[in-house]
Image (cartoon, rainbow, N blue to C red):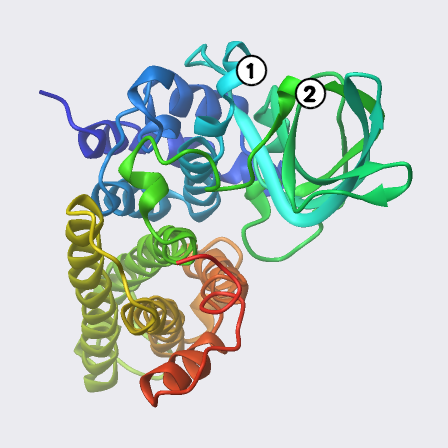
Amino acid sequence: MTTPLDTARSLEDLVRSHADEAEASRRLPEPVAQAFAASGLYRIAAPPDLSGLDADPVTQMSVIETVSRFDGSAGWNLMIGIETFGLLAPACVRCRELIVDPLVVMASSTAAVGRADRDGDGYRVKGRWQFVSGCHNAAVFGATIRLYENGEPVSANLYAIVTEPDFRIEDTWHVGGLRGSGSHDVVVDGVWVPQDRIVAPLGGGEATTAQLRFPLGARLAFNKVAVALGIARAGIEAFVDLAEGKVPRFTSSSLRDRPASQRAVAEAEVRVRAGRALVCELLEQMWAQVLAGEHITTRERALFQLACSDAVRGCVSAVDIVCDAAGTTANQQDHPLERIARDVRVVRQHVTVASHHIDDAGRVLLGLPAQGMMLAGMRG
């Protein structure tokens, strides 16, 4: 039986062959997106009635990590798709026809909150949403909105499901790292959306699957770790390949023979593996608790957040270590390490795994109340 990980591995040549195109065009090439959809990878966390596999978190991590090793931007796009179908699609109970086709790709954004004013038996939706990764490949867009009646807000955050051509993409993704993720802005200008396309917020649908019973903050963190792990693995592999052939200036021996290179690859290897091992250990424990219907405490979530933020920080550190040992080669645009170094830093900047969450986790471990959005601002 073919597993999702087998499927991810089988796409290596395709993903790698389009990586430079993604970098240049600042979006995920359509053949890669189509392959993710056709192979079912976007939907591995979705429920079975939406052509999903409802795969466990470690399987999700392994798939995303694998694709991210081939190309960080492709891995990021896949990760966002998996989250969207796992956490938002189940809420589309009354508009399933929009996404029931397994080839349909859906994008979404929580980076802004739009406005939806009552208009008859629907709403007029207006807003601009940033960081909509993979938006060029999507036929359906999930927009975070708040409902208004007579000019006054009447709801917490919800989602409006908008289809082509009722949303437009604005070219705003001018960045250094993860250029190929295509995380541009999406704009909706007063489009009328029927009531049945206003759905529960991310992870807020009825808990019909174990995915929706998993703590939302933790759910949004571990997949980011997977992207960083894949990119860091690619960095270590690129350094090993370089070290075998490069003879640094003013020396007669290869880079591989330098004690500093040997130490660098050893430190990078253990840093990446240690971070991965801890995240997976805690993830498996939490998943078992979810399946058993047990409550996951704030302390347990704090430990997991600490592990996730530190693992991403460790991946960045690992890439920095091998780039330092690689010398000026790591700064050359035609060498993989140059892009890898840019890409992995973007993951560390993401709000779900940023380093400052380590401080908040420490507060909880000392018996103080959490203050940050990941531990205090999201439901357990």
* Circle count: 2
Q: Nearer the viewer, residue 243 or 220?
A: 220
| Amino acid tagged 2 | Gln
Q: Position of residue 174 (x, y in %)?
A: 71, 51
2 or 1: tag closer to the N-terminus: 1
Q: Position of residue 344 (x, y in %)?
A: 45, 61
Q: Report the quarter where the C terminus lies.
A: bottom left
Q: Relative to 189, is 136 on the left or the right?
A: left
Instruction: Give the class, few, some or many, for how many residues have Cα within 10 Å of label 2's Cα (few <14, many ≥20).
Output: some
Q: Residue at x 58, y 40 (%)?
A: 133
| Secondary structure at numbered mark 1 | helix
Q: Is residue 55 above or below residue 243?
A: above
Q: Which residue is mark 1?
A: 95
Q: Quadrant of residue 109?
A: top right
Q: Quadrant of residue 302?
A: bottom left
Residue lying at the far bottom of the rendered structure: 366
Which of the numbered marks, if any, corresponds to residue 150? none
Which of the numbered marks, if any, corresponds to residue 195? 2
Q: Relative to 210, is 90 on the left or the right?
A: right
Q: Is residue 202 above or below residue 125?
A: below
Q: Position of residue 91 (x, y in %)?
A: 49, 28
| Secondary structure at numbered mark 2 | helix
Q: Is residue 86 above or below residue 297?
A: above
Asked whether residue 183 appears in the rendered view, the answer is no
| Amino acid tagged 1 | Cys
Instruction: Give the class, few, some or many, for how many residues have Cα within 10 Å of label 1's Cα (few <14, many ≥20).
Output: some
